[in-house]
Amino acid sequence: MTDIVATNETILVVGGGISGMTAAIEAAECGKDVILVEKAPSLGGRVSQLYKYFPKLCFPTCGLEINQRRMKANKNLHILTLSEVTNIAGDSGNFTATVKTAPRYVNENCTACGACGDAVTAEVDNPFNYNLDKIKAAYLPHNMAHPQRYVIDPSIIGTDEAEKAKTACKYDAIDLDMQETTMDLNVGAIVWATGWKPYDAAKIQPYGYDRFDNVITSVEFERMMDAFGPTGGKLLRPSDGKEAKNIAFIQCAGSRDRNHLTHCSRICCMASLKQTTYLTEQYGDDEEAKASIYYIDIRAIDRFEDFYQKVQDDPKVSFIKSKVANITLDEESGNPVLHGVDTEGYHRYSNPHDLVVLAIGMTPNVDISEIASGVSTDSSGFIQVNVDNGGIFAAGCASNALDVNRSVQSATAATLHSIQVVNKVSAAEA
Ligand SMILES: Cc1cc2nc3c(=O)[nH]c(=O)nc-3n(C[C@H](O)[C@H](O)[C@H](O)COP(=O)(O)OP(=O)(O)OC[C@H]3O[C@@H](n4cnc5c(N)ncnc54)[C@H](O)[C@@H]3O)c2cc1C
């Protein structure tokens, strides 16, 4: 970290999800000096937590691995993990960004051998699996983590557990004296790619996410399918561990709703359509496996229409045009029961399901106004891209609820703008 040198020809990328990784690589491969700052212990953002990507249904590991290889091969790129930008002062071509870095307690000697993880017994919530399971307090964030370096959870610092981890390490990689650091970086342009977070499902009280174990969110469902997820890749009900076969997907859960998020997150329909294919993957042609999509209207834009058509043709999947009014619990079976009116037949329903998946909306991760002044946001807090934000360029879901394809396109656009800024600086200094 101490070898980081930044100048006003440096491009700072904040957020190391797919958008930030793309922006950083593109700029570095154009020969620019780039610093990528990521808050989590590893790169990849929420894409690394997906089981599969629509529309091709491939694993995200594939796209991430290509990016990781490009990053490793580029000497212009410096990566700071466990770091966040807390303040930005100055102007286009001459910013001072304050970066705060939390201690990892593990240095670059780490070979990810796992001996520290084996040595400790303490466990902490596993953020990679949305806290649905526990992980050892000395852990690798996930299999594809970049950097491949363990983290010691701060909760065990000062305890015997931390000492056990240190003693187990053959590579002198554990440094329990690491402290939080803060530094100021002089940079010329900034790509802001801090992404999105899921809307807090507990706020949608009629759906009982905070009361009913078998009501989960779409992001949690993604983790369930993963062999390294909380259920080892099985669709098991949180309440009793029984296989979930009759699954309801509720669209616009908290979206397009003046009480919650007024905007449409665009992705949720495609995410649920994708998730119905997980049932086929899990249960083959088992007739008990059923997906019911409760929707206001399905928004599957341009080429995604073909994907939608394929799902419509799947006999396992039915579509109920209805905004679900509320969910109650059938105490005996543990089944959530969905109540509402089917607007295509105008009859009331009370439908029990094994599991309910809320297609939750996306909100910006960071309120940029707390960090930099003069950056315009829309009414949902996403950074506006078609206005002059004075040398700060938003990429990916920091600018809107976008799929991966569009996030990557927007990251490339942001990179181009940031390169123009630093090129101007170097031309002026030549
Ligand atoms: C249920 C669901 C399923 C989806 N499935 C698909 C799919 O199949 N196909 C598809 O194309 N899209 C899918 N998406 C959309 C996809 O997740 C987004 O397009 C993608 O995550 C956007 O990447 P990003 O880098 O912009 O943001 P993120 O993935 O959110 O990454 C942002 C990064 O910034 C970091 N960060 C946050 N705050 C700070 C800070 N203050 N300082 C430094 N770093 C910070 C975060 O830790 C994170 O690493 C899905 C979305 C949902 C809700």
Image (cartoon, rainbow, N blue to C red):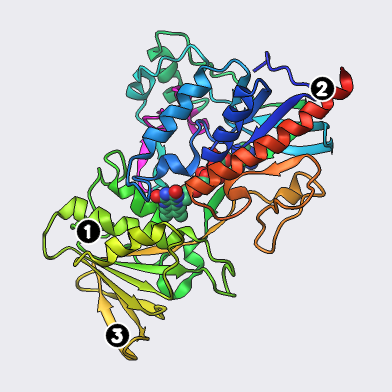
Residue furthest toward the left? 286
Q: Which of marks 2 and 1 is nearer the N terminus?
A: 1
Q: How crowded is mark 3: few (under 14 residues within 10 Å), some or many (20 or more)?
A: few
User: Which mark is drawn over residue 426?
Assistant: 2
Magenta residues, as a range?
A: 132-156
Image-based side of 275 in relation to 360, left or right: left
Instruction: Please identify the quadrant where the C terminus is shown.
Output: top right
Kindly indicate the quadrant of the structure image that contains residue 377: bottom right
Q: Does the Cβ of the disc 2 residue fall within 8 Å of ligand 1?
A: no
Q: Which residue is drawn at 50% across and 23% down?
A: 70
Q: Which of marks 2 and 3 is nearer the N terminus?
A: 3
Q: Residue at x 42, y 56 (%)?
A: 303
In x, y percent, where is residue 98? Answer: 75, 32
User: Which mark is drawn over residue 339?
Assistant: none
How many circles with numbers are drawn on the protein? Answer: 3
Q: Does the Cβ of the disc 1 residue fall within 8 Å of ligand 1?
A: no
Q: Is residue 375 magenta?
A: no
**Circle 1 residue:** 240
Instruction: Mark 3 and mark 1 in contact? Answer it, CB < 8 Å.
Output: no
Disc 1, SS = loop
Res. 29 in view:
yes
In x, y percent, where is residue 317? Answer: 24, 67
**Circle 3 residue:** 349
The residues tagged by marks 2 and 1 sit, at their Cα atoms, a distance apart of: 63 Å
Q: Residue at x 12, y 58 (%)?
A: 285
The residues tagged by marks 2 and 3 sit, at their Cα atoms, a distance apart of: 66 Å
